[in-house]
Image: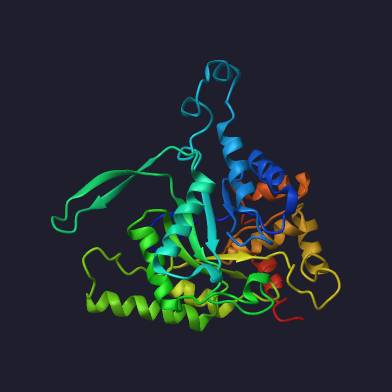
Amino acid sequence: MFYTNNNSTAIGVGFGTAALGGSCFDIVGLALEAGFRKFDTAEADWWYDQTSVGRALSHYFFKPTNEEEDQTCVSAEFCGKSCQVEELRISTKIPPWSLTSFDDIRAHAAASREELLGFCDETLIAVTDESTGIATEKSIPYPLDVYYIHAPACWKGWHPRCDNPPPTLDFRSAWQAMEAVVGLDHSAKRIGLSNVRPDELLDILQFVKQRQESGDIQHGDPPPRKPDVVQAFADPIRPADELRRICREHDIEFVSYSTLGTQHRSVSGNPVLGSPLVQSIANKHGRSTAEVVLSWALQKGMSVIPRSSNKNHIQQLARLLGENPGFLENDDMQQIDSMKDTI
């Protein structure tokens, strides 16, 4: 199991939606049919199509669950599946060029929640009155699972919009706005950082700790909150050891992207999935090479968000949602660990 610093249980296997192009709607539908209920997207166009992810989710969840319901359904209120019962968990990210003000960040989170999950029923949360300390239940729109800062800042070549970005908040100020996304607006259950360096993560952790220890929190301000989740590139060749170490020490969930070796553009082919070592382990267990690498990541304590546009591959990936996603033996793990820094 995977635990976060707010004691909620996180799902270890999700589905990524980057670079799916015009097929995004259909592919998300296939992933839902295969059993995925955790999806990762982003507001950054060109790479992502958040609108199509939201459309696919609402289309799937609004479908009547049986023929009798199909005949009697007169409104969305009586149709389809419950987001809460199905444990739908959707994460998205605000791009660095949108970190323009405290209010802008909060507005982006609220708009993304509506675009992705506006079709869901409301849910109840516990809210404590600051003056009395009494906790009561409050009904809120169904929230995002995680709202990330996609990257601390723009750099040229990362995205076309980073070639001439607008003035933005400094990283610490942007993080305070993110705290409001959870603590005041309830647009998301958790907040996180993506594409962050170890020193940048440590700086935010120090910033949060300083404010918690000083107790200098104004009435109406959100409480200081450390990142619940960090998302970064990690695979057997580049396992992000230092970043993962910091996450472990601070009880932060680590979500790996490009886990299947797709970031090594300086070499021909895929050095992870194409590895004879990985293929041998896959043959041993009767699994695909992708399942082997993802199982390695899960057993190292990472969550994963693989993606595929192939129906058969999506169904293979969905096998990791079953009872035994961590099927590798100690010797298998050690062999895959030996791939570190081999290119």
Q: Quadrant of the C terminus?
A: bottom right
- Asked whether residue 88 appears in the rendered view, the answer is no
Q: How is the image coloured?
A: rainbow
What is the residue that sits farthest to the bottom in this orientation? 199
What is the residue that sits farthest to the right in this orientation? 268
- The residue shown at (76%, 59%) is 289
* Placement of 312 over or under 223, stated as above or below: above
Horizontal arrangement in the rendering, residue 96 relative to residue 317 (left or right): left
* Placement of 333 over or under 43, stated as above or below: below
Horizontal arrangement in the rendering, residue 47 relative to residue 87 (left or right): right
State the image coordinates of residue 204 (x, y, percent, origin top left). 42, 77
* Placement of 49 over or under 167, stated as above or below: above
State the image coordinates of residue 54 (x, y, percent, origin top left). 58, 46
Horizontal arrangement in the rendering, residue 277 relative to residue 80 (left or right): right
* Placement of 140 over or under 200, stated as above or below: above
- The residue shown at (61%, 57%) is 326
Q: On the image, which quarter does residue 277 sit in?
A: bottom right
Looking at the picture, tell me which residue is in the foreground, 117 or 201.
Answer: 117
- The residue shown at (80%, 71%) is 271
State the image coordinates of residue 106 (x, y, percent, origin top left). 42, 60
- Asked whether residue 206 appears in the rendered view, the answer is yes
